[in-house]
Image (spheres, grey):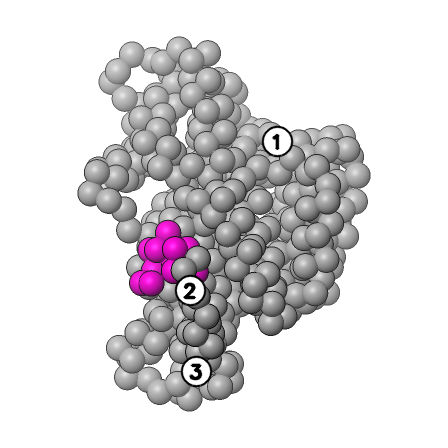
Amino acid sequence: MGTGGERVAELRKARGLTQVALARRAGVSSSLLSKIEVGDRTLTPANAAAIARALRVSLGALYGEVEVAEDQSVLLAALRTAVRRYDIPDQAPVPDPAQLRVEVDRAVTLTGQADLAGLLRMLPGLLTRATTYAHAAASPQGWTLLVDVYGAVYALAGWNRWMDLVEVAPLRQAWAAGQQPNSLLTALATRDRAGTFLLCGDFDGGLTVVDRAIVAAETELAGPERAFAAGVLHLRGMTLAGRRGDRAEAERHIHAAWTAAEAFPRDLEAHSQLFGPANTAAHVLATEGDLGRPREVVRLAEELAGNDTGLPPTRLVDVHTDTARARLDLGDRDGAQASLVTAFTVAPQKAKVRPMIREVLRVLISLHRRSNPQLVQLVQLARQAGLAG
């Protein structure tokens, strides 16, 4: 699985395009495109989306789907089958709801821990059982359990860039949420649907989905549920706006998210979604990076490091990834490398498949090779990420 910058060069050459021609189509400078391809600059999410559109490929195709081992491919096929059979209950006995709740809680825990292998082992059977129970019980409890399972499916698919599931899982999640109906679950499912737009590089469409959902949540919900739903959606909105490079829109969502977070002294988890002051700070940090403010990223990272945030590994690995990118942009290679080491320590399975980690590694190795220092630790990280040493 090549990195984004390498894939850009491969796809460009396969289409017979020069760097100048592709740069013109994508709206980036040819010098920047050249630096991205040779490993002097990281491929940022915003540039990746623009280049993917210019190449007429999906953002997932540009980054490349994460490959799975032969034994895991059987599990992935079973998961796709379970998603496809969303309206066909299994012929097995209806599961016990108490045991099913335990299993769903375990899946939520694995999601927070970014245990990709554990989730893939668990989700095909769990989704089948949750689907069977939801149809048999036809109760709010049953549909809620199914919504939570689809949230885990979406997270796993997004991390691995299994774009067919990225597209379908949120739709199934929204369908299950609508069987009750439940305005909170609908809002949280819409957050994942907006994530599909994010992963596909359609930032404008994602922002439209978010704004509509915020209006609905603020109209239909009250109290802590209203703050939680709106806050989660504003987090998604700031990310989309940051990727689009729209500072005014990002600031709007940042301000609204901080306002919503005032309702929660510490972060609260509900239906595998996390919201509160720490997760808001983590999202602001990422958005500042997308808006080209690396010094602000480092400042916010130092603030988070000095506080007992309680953020799960799946969020902490993103913080360290964004910090690595920011430190690299500031010319602090040692700091970038240290952040990458921490990311792999916190959540090694997610770190291995994160496109930005692979990009920062690629650029660090390219830069270090020219000055010829010891590359032992960088090579070890590259091997963990599946890159050539």
379 inside magenta stretch: yes
The image's mark for residue 34 is 3
Write down the quadrant of residue 190 in the picture. Answer: top right
Residue closest to the eye, 199 or 65: 65
Residue 65: percent from the left, percent from the top? Answer: 33, 55
- Under circle 2, the secondary element is loop
Q: Position of residue 288 (x, y in %)?
A: 67, 61
Residue corresponding to mark 2: 375
Q: CA distance from mark 2 to mark 3?
A: 24 Å
Q: Is residue 266 above or below residue 139?
A: below
Looking at marks 2 and 1 on the same chain, the residue that comes earlier in the sequence is marked by 1
The secondary element bearing badge 3 is classed as helix
Question: Residue flagged by tag 1: what amino acid is it?
Answer: Glu
Q: Residues within 10 Å of mark 2 (few under 14, many from 20)?
A: few
Dot 1 crowding, Cα within 10 Å, few <14, some 14–19, many 20+:
few
Question: Residue, x 66% and y 31% (percent of image)?
Answer: 268
Left or right placement of residue 251 versus residue 243 in this view: right
Which quadrant does the N terminus fall into?
A: bottom left
